[in-house]
Amino acid sequence: MIVQIAPEREEEFAIFNHLESEVRSYARSFPVVFAKARGAQLFARDGTAYLDFLMGCSSLNYGHNHPELKAALAEYIANDGITHGLDLYNEAKESFLREFHETILRPRHLDYVVQFPGPTGANAVEAALKLARKITCRPNIIAFTNGFHGVSLGALSCTGNRYHRAAAGQLLGGVTRLPYDGYLGSGVDTADYLDHLLSDPSSGVDAPAAVIVETVQGEGGLNVAGTGRLRKVAAIARRHGALLIVDDIQAGVGRTDAFFSFEAAGLRPDIVTMAKSISGYGLPMALVLIDRKLDRWDPGEHNGTFRGNCHAFVTARAALEHFWRTDSFAASAREKGNLLKSRLDQVAQKYDPGRASAKGRGMMRGIDLKSGEVAGRVVRIAFQKGLVVETAGPYDEVVKCLPPLIIGEDQLGQGLDILEDAIDSVIAAQRPQQIER
């Protein structure tokens, strides 16, 4: 979705247009120069406030510049704390690891070791795939339709989106793509299909090193895998000697009701990839969580220069300490997720199901408007009214809401009012044309 910039405003964006690559994307949809951010709001240079339902694509689950996290980082910098540490032992990493173990892993009885692969989710996915292949001595990976795991070549091989795949300029192999839950309709159990293929020596599907899955597909259009289906996939992977990798990069860190998105299904993945909101403050940071008995790396076998971002360790620790030592934050997020669901259901129910339907889980929800053109117009009008929100899905047909988990109910309601008005105005504008037909 691209918004045309008025000629009189071209000068405001001149430096970006002159020096920044054409690869930029979000900026084209929201053509203002942002200057400040706080909580659930972005502020343009002219002072205009926007509610942010994009939140760095779920990189800012605790909102912009949360005061507790900002104070922890400012104190660390003021005391000349180490900024860049490769994988050296340092106090910032030590504090994060201790807090992560005590607050997240141990209460959930998860015996993972932590790998810092580099700063992005794609780095985490690349490391997870590489480790799975090393452990099993198998090259094949099972990935799913509409999955999105990153755009570096290994991760891109697991990504379904044709537009992103085409940019590789080469064949993307080593992956067998199978239908996600619901892809073939409610009458087809895609987990049984997966099991049948792997059980049949003439199916043409090679024994996989791993099955990689998102419990909720963010970029793929807010498709949700049922808990029963996830359990079946985990059991199938185990039965066929494959590892289960859960990509929790967008759906994790509270976005889908609990810290991990797979908790509701009672899963114990072999490997978990995390990034985005794990740092708490929008600082680059990614994790690969590895079942302790599967930590088969040799020293330095997989690395990255910026795997030691100590500023991210500081804010990540502060976020865990402030938000996750009790269940109150998760409970609050669940309540807001229910409110978000209720409002989106109400909006969708105003229209024929072939025109609008609500979907998603937790605080990761949206409305499928069945048309990328319609969804794009809704996003443009919402932005004009003060709401930043994006689209997702194979045709960009889903308006995806990712408000911060700390948002107040008043601001959440305000943003949803804007979204509802935008949807109403776009669909109402279509009606005369449809009547003429």
Image (cartoon, helix red, strand yellow):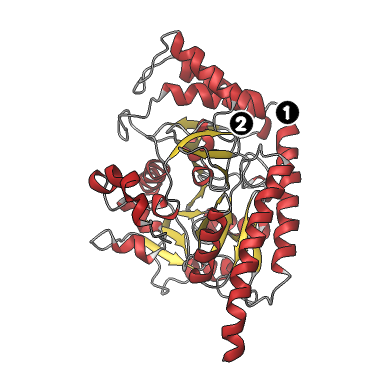
Residue with the most extreme front position: 8
Residue type marked 2 = Leu
On residue 151, the disc is: none
Q: Which residue is mark 1?
A: 326
Position of 184 compared to 337: left or right? left
Mark 1 crowd level (few <14, some 14–19, many ≥20, 10 Å Cα): few
CA–CA distance in space, label 1 to label 2: 14 Å
Judged left or right of residue 59, residue 364 is right
Q: Where's residue 135, x and y in %? A: 39, 44
Question: Residue drawn at (66%, 29%), measured in percent from left and top?
Answer: 323
Question: Which residue is at the far bottom?
Answer: 437
Occupied quadrant, residue 417: bottom right
Q: Which residue is mark 2?
A: 105
Q: Residue at x 65, y 48 (%)?
A: 363
SS for dot 2: helix
User: x and y percent of residue 334 in the render?
Assistant: 73, 44
- The mark nearer the N terminus, 1 or 2, is 2
Residue 390: % across, % down: 51, 55
Which picture quadrant has residue 257?
top right
Amino acid type at image mark 1: Thr
Location of residue 426 with respect to 408 vertically, above or below: below
Asked whether the viewer can see residue 286, the reply is yes
Q: What residue appears at the point 42 percent right and 12 percent down from the top-left corner?
A: 81
